[in-house]
Image (spheres, coloured by chain):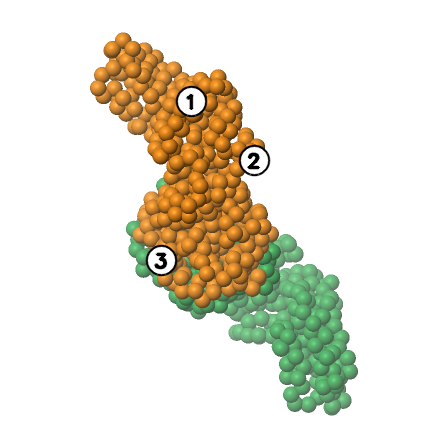
Chain colours: A orange, B green
């Protein structure tokens, strides 16, 4: 017998027929003898309608009242799913976030889970009842309703799994797992059976938006084994048909052969900025990035060229495309102080990354990347690396070519 | 300064523009220096959608889960209205039923309010904040969500007014008050300025569906002064432009001239049943109505004819039209035991009633009714009376004629 938390997203519970389908999946897990708790999102479209009403009333609204309104979406789903399970002959009841309670801080509309009281929940589960819990919400120390921000249901599920010391947290989505790269670009992309939290974080933040980043961080901190799988497949979580996100140790301990590189990610949502002829003196990087931080603009890849003439240098970095205009404006405003020559920007770039915990212990991973891209005539504009990833910025038109070439070079293509 | 509870129904908060309009009405009451609390229904249509989903999942559902689902409708409105008030510069916050709490019994889907804790509410009100409270719901002794049944928002408002010892409870609806009869039938129908609880109860149960019956009973028991008025008028409650429902003593104390008859009501939703030649012996009435009570069929007007031949009698009574077929079936099943001749039924009837607390102290009210109907050639099929009302059953085609004639006879026509 295992204790499992199942989480179903908005499209999985998009109408009453789909909710009935979810009930059958939950029942099948119960019939396998597992102790099951379920976390659900709002029916797809419901939250958008609620947010629309809020904005019609007032674009600048009290986040405490915003939370009162939008939290209703999941409350509808918990009641409906509990009924659907009872209809299937499975004992079930819904629990609102204040009934458990799910305690959060008081950062309304973007709260963080502090603690989930699971004493009563665990008791009813061991008595054969399936609790249905709303994702995305909790109660503040003042006893008011909070929400975790969009996508927070994954985080709720992982937090509940941690609190219940569950054997696994199955996140049912509209994809059947994590792939070595986007299957729409590389036909031979393969589903990854097991991936580490660290790799998943790199993949998520690089554009493979399967799991919310915060939920992966939480799973990593609490060692919650997370499985991503499709709610539209017939397969059940206990067969492990999806992608399991776990500790590196678990993968190693099972003696599984782990490829050096797990996947190739890409992102087209960043723009490149080059500030030319910046006087090369201590503190210049801080002087450039200070105004951007003040404007709440995230800077990602950064390269400082070696000083050409001994007195000035070029700084190149990337920012989200949506922030490019503001970033350029801020830098131009600081021109008098910074004394650079000019600010150049380029929207036409793409970030391609090779990810894998195996590269820690393998030399030559970066070299293979550079050689592969060179062989295809793709110019690398910026390079940045971390322990488990190498990212390069290339002209956007080369994105697909680069991803396909790297997927083949690292032997990720399906047979 | 007065303390007032304002209640707005579903059509008054049907979309975000109407919610903004409600906020302006509330603000105007606050600017008059009144302490104001607001009770709201779900946006019109919202509850129906929620109930539809519930029935799609399972027609035989757990009422506890039903309540979790349908209670979300009002939670949306309280958040939106609190925001709209803040937008108008009025301090406001929403309170869910479990935050106050509004304690009810555990009769899920048809719960009764037991107690409302208003300590915190009264404190915030005297500090100038307007609390927004959801109608129609509460929490059970087990800490689960309950609802009061359809139309329960009026009851919530009256219960809150009683708990807050409010000076008045203003119920904003889509009509501007209680009329002497249906203005669609009698052009000269007049709005009644003041009506007693008892009269209002008779009017509500007889078809003038302005206030939910339970809310009027509650108001009567706790002496809550209730005003019915339109949310689409510009007029505010403090001008008393609607109909005030109060104790008879208050009307008397003000030395107001009270007409003997307050209004003429009618109902077309009953059918007549006559059981002929029932053996005239003790216990026969119980024998006839026993099977109907078992089938949960409400019997209204009852007449037992004087025995014609000394050994048998005819029994005539009315039942809701929707229950007629079942009622006849039950009686036919009991024929062997009851030994009557036959069961005759008639759907083509209408109940017309004259209502007024004044008739307690005035003779001749019934006589005038019978004379008026006779003068128009309208045959009376059944008569039933109470202390403050006289009802007659007539052929349905005479309904409008009877109502108009009585409205004139009792001098209710507007000048």
| Residue A270 drawn at (x, y percent) | 42, 26
Above-or-below relation of B271 to B58: below
Please identify the residue farthest to the top as the structure is shown.
Answer: A309
Q: Nearer the viewer, residue A98 or A410?
A: A410
Chain identity of mark 2: A
| Residue A109 drawn at (x, y percent) | 38, 43
Q: Earlier in the sequence, mark 1 or mark 3?
A: 3
Dividing the picture into quadrants, the one containing residue B163 is: bottom left
Residue density around tag 2, few if under 14, some if 14–19, many if 20 or more, within 10 Å: few
Q: Is residue B295 left or right of residue B307?
A: left
Q: Is residue B29 visible?
A: no
Query: Are the numbered discs 1 and 2 placed on the same chain, yes or no?
Result: yes
Q: Earlier in the sequence, mark 3 or mark 2?
A: 3
User: Whole-Å distance between the Cαs marked 3 and 2?
Assistant: 48 Å
From the image, tell me which residue sits under label 2.
A415
Q: Nearer the viewer, residue B335 or A289?
A: A289
From the image, tell me which residue sits under label 1.
A370
Q: Which mark is residue A42?
A: none
Give the residue drawn at x 49%, y 40%.
A192
Badge 2 marks a residue whose secondary structure is: loop
Q: Is residue B121 left or right of residue B312?
A: left
From the image, tell me which residue sits under label 3.
A117
Please identify the residue farthest to the left as the structure is shown.
Answer: A282
Badge 1 marks a residue whose secondary structure is: helix
User: Whole-Å distance between the Cαs marked 1 and 3?
Assistant: 51 Å
Q: Is residue A118 left or right of residue A179?
A: left
Chain identity of mark 1: A
| Residue B142 drawn at (x, y percent) | 41, 66
């Amino acid at each position: 017998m295992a204790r499992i938390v199942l989480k179903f997203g908005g499209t999985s519970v998009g109408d009453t027929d789909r909710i009935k389908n979810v009930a059958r999946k939950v029942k099948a897990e119960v019939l396998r003898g597992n102790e099951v708790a379920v976390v659900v999102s709002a029916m797809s479209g419901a939250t958008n309608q609620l947010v629309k009403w809020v904005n019609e009333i007032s674009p600048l609204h009290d986040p405490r009242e915003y939370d009162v309104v939008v939290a209703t979406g999941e409350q509808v789903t918990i009641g409906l799913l509990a009924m659907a399970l009872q209809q299937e002959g499975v004992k079930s009841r819904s629990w609102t976030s204040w009934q458990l309670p799910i305690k959060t801080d008081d950062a309304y509309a973007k709260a963080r889970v502090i603690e989930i009281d699971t004493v009563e929940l665990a008791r009813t589960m061991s008595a054969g009842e399936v609790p249905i819990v709303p994702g995305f919400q909790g109660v503040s120390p003042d006893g008011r309703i909070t929400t975790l921000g969009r996508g927070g249901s994954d985080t709720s599920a992982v937090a509940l799994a941690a609190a219940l010391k569950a054997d696994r947290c199955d996140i049912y989505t509209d994809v059947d797992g994590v792939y070595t790269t986007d299957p729409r670009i590389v036909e031979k992309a393969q589903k990854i059976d097991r991936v580490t939290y660290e790799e998943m974080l790199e993949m998520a933040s690089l554009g493979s938006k399967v799991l919310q980043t915060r939920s992966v961080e939480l799973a990593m901190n609490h060692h919650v084994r997370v499985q991503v799988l499709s709610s539209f497949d017939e397969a059940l979580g206990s067969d492990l048909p999806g992608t399991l996100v776990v500790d590196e140790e678990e993968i190693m301990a099972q003696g599984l052969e782990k490829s050096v590189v797990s996947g190739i990610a890409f992102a087209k949502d960043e723009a490149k900025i080059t500030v030319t002829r910046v006087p090369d003196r201590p503190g210049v990087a801080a002087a450039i990035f200070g105004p951007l931080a003040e404007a709440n603009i995230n800077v990602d890849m950064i390269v400082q060229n070696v000083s050409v003439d001994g007195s000035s240098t070029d700084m190149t970095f990337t920012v989200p495309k949506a922030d490019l205009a503001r970033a350029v404006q801020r830098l131009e405003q600081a021109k008098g102080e910074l004394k650079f020559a000019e600010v150049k920007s380029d929207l036409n770039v793409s970030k391609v990354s090779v990810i894998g915990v195996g590269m820690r212990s393998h030399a030559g991973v970066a070299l293979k990347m550079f050689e592969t891209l060179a062989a295809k005539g793709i110019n690398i504009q910026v390079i940045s690396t971390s322990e488990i990833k190498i990212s390069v910025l290339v002209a956007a038109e080369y994105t697909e070519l680069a991803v396909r070439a790297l997927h083949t070079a690292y032997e990720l293509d399906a047979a």
